[in-house]
Amino acid sequence: MVRLKQNILDIKRRANAAAKRSGRNPDNIHIVAVTKNISSEKIQKAVDEGLVILGENRVQEALTKFEAVKSDVQWHLIGHLQKNKVKRAISMFSMIQSVDSMSLAEEINKRAKQIEQTIDILVQINIGREKTKYGIDPDEAVNFLEGLAMLSNLNVKGLMAIAPFKQNPEEVRPYFRHLREIFEIIKQKSIKNVHMDYLSMGMSGDFEVAIEEGANMIRIGTGIFGARTN
């Protein structure tokens, strides 16, 4: 677990440096530890090293970890959410980062209303317009966010995206910049129930570029836990 501690320190150091390069406060960068296929024991070690936001891709996998990890942490759902898993998801996750359709948003709103809660969400934008990825088309983002204003049990907190994979992180920069532009346009519109607090973009291979382009939430898996074996 010595390597885990060193990995976390390294990610924090690089994130801080990227924030400073872009004239921003490093304290405002939130690291989401991506726990897909990671054991509860290893997750607990990461939490013990100071990580407080855990990102899980699947509701079913999170079920086994939710009770096992002991500490005051936030669980975020960062993978695609099926509508039949919404009821379970809103009882476990403090934020759903992957709202990618109006029908899903409406289901979350309905379930939240039933338990008299307001659920924090991010809207996932398919910034690369990739057929293999979920998300709202960038050109439809503003209209989509305006449509969410009527769903009173949703608290829209920002945007999320998974950029296209490139060997050279610099090739991803235009996608991050485009998402930041959408983020700023939506912020300026001051839409009811829509708050642009978080811009979640950047993963282990490109998070420094993402921060330089405006990300204040990064999702790190292999950079923290190492390469997955399954």
Image (cartoon, rainbow, N blue to C red):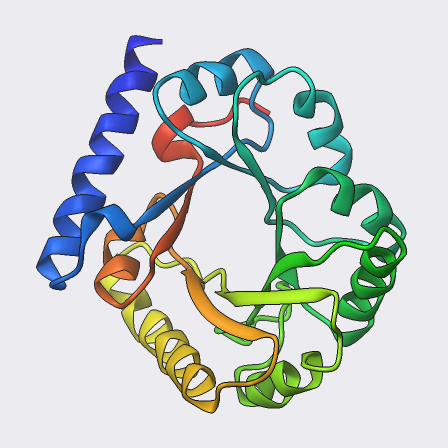
Residue 50 against residue 149 in the figure, above or below: above
Instruction: Locate residue 88 relative to residue 64 in the image: left or right.
Output: right
Residue 226 visible in the snapshot: no
Q: How many marks?
A: 0
The image quarter containing residue 15 is top left
Q: Residue at x 47, y 90 (%)?
A: 189
- Residue 100, given in percent of the width and then of the height, sits at 68, 68
Instruction: Locate residue 36 relative to residue 210 in the image: left or right.
Output: right
- Residue 133, given in percent of the width and then of the height, sits at 62, 63
Query: What is the quadrant of the N terminus in the image?
Result: top left
- Residue 30, given in percent of the width and then of the height, sits at 36, 46
Residue closer to the observer: 156 or 55: 156
Instruction: Locate residue 106 relative to residue 202 in the image: left or right.
Output: right
Residue 46 visible in the snapshot: yes
Q: Residue at x 26, y 68 (%)?
A: 213
- Residue 221, given in percent of the width and then of the height, sits at 44, 36
Residue 188 against residue 125 in the figure, above or below: below
Residue 204 against residue 226 in the figure, above or below: below
The image quarter containing residue 184 is bottom left
Q: Residue at x 59, y 16 (%)?
A: 40
Query: What is the quadrant of the C terminus in the image?
Result: top right
Residue 4 against residue 218 in the figure, above or below: above
Q: Residue at x 12, y 47 (%)?
A: 17
